[in-house]
Amino acid sequence: MPTSEPSATLVVADLVGIFVFAISGALVAVRKDLDVFGVLVLAGTTGLGGGFLRDVLIGATPPAALADWRYLLVPVGAGLLTFWFHPTLGRRERTINVFDAFGLGLFCVAGALKALEYGLGPVPAALMGMVTGIGGGMARDLLTSRVPTIFRDELYATPALSGATIAVVGSRLDLPVLVCASVGATVCTLWRLLAMWRQWHAPMPRGPASV
């Protein structure tokens, strides 16, 4: 268990990641023609899902989403903003994926660094960062009958794991938390955006699938 509360940098990264991810979830809800309640549910699920799962797995109970009112207010605010201003934000898949990429970058480093604070080793902490990044998006896609982004062709989990690993290595080298988080999040976000733009794919099975 940690000896102190999570640092202000981690809390800010968590809240900004929740906001961005919640917007991506709300945009999916708008695209699916859900009502305001559906928009808020999907915004909350997307924004809080990965962090909730991380906190349960590392023993940070009660999860921050239940212990800190800011973690509930942020996705509600993001959902309402998206509901009212969705024509400006856009309903296209590209817009959703861009917000998702920024959320992925923020969440993977916040998850990894928080796991380190709770005593996990470097490898489990990096994996927790990846889980934090992909958890909310998977829940969003499953609730809306979409194939989860992590299972599509374009790279998704790999950038998250890389960003989390950079944050963990930087922390082990005693670099400032802000530097570790910024570099890891930037690498993850840029890699994800480049993967979408250049259509980089994870390896796929060769030949026809057997029946």
Image (tube, rainbow, N blue to C red):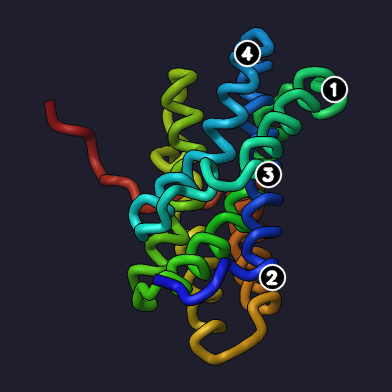
Disc 3 marks a residue whose amino acid type is: Arg
Disc 2 marks a residue whose amino acid type is: Ser
Q: Which residue is at a point 51% across and 38% down the rendered structure image?
A: 137
Q: Which type of secondary structure does the marked residue at label 4 adopt?
A: helix
Q: Residues within 10 Å of mark 3 (few under 14, many from 20)?
A: some
Near-viewer residue (161 or 199):
161
Q: Which mark is residue 69?
A: none
Q: Residues within 10 Å of mark 1 (few under 14, many from 20)?
A: few
Relative image position of residue 101 (x, y in whole percent): 63, 48
Q: Which mark is residue 85?
A: 1
Q: Which residue is at a point 56% across and 64% down the rendered structure image?
A: 109
Give the mark nearest the N terminus, 2 or 4: 4
Q: Residues within 10 Å of mark 2 (few under 14, many from 20)?
A: some
Give the mark nearest the N terminus, 1 or 2: 1
Residue under label 4: 37
Give the mark nearest the N terminus, 3 or 1: 3
Residue under label 3: 70
Near-viewer residue (140 or 148):
140
**Horizontal arrangement in the rendering, residue 41 relative to residue 80 (left or right):** left
Q: Which residue is at a point 34% across and 54% down the rendered structure image?
A: 57
Any part of residue 159 in sight: no
Mark nearest the camera among 2 and 4 is 4
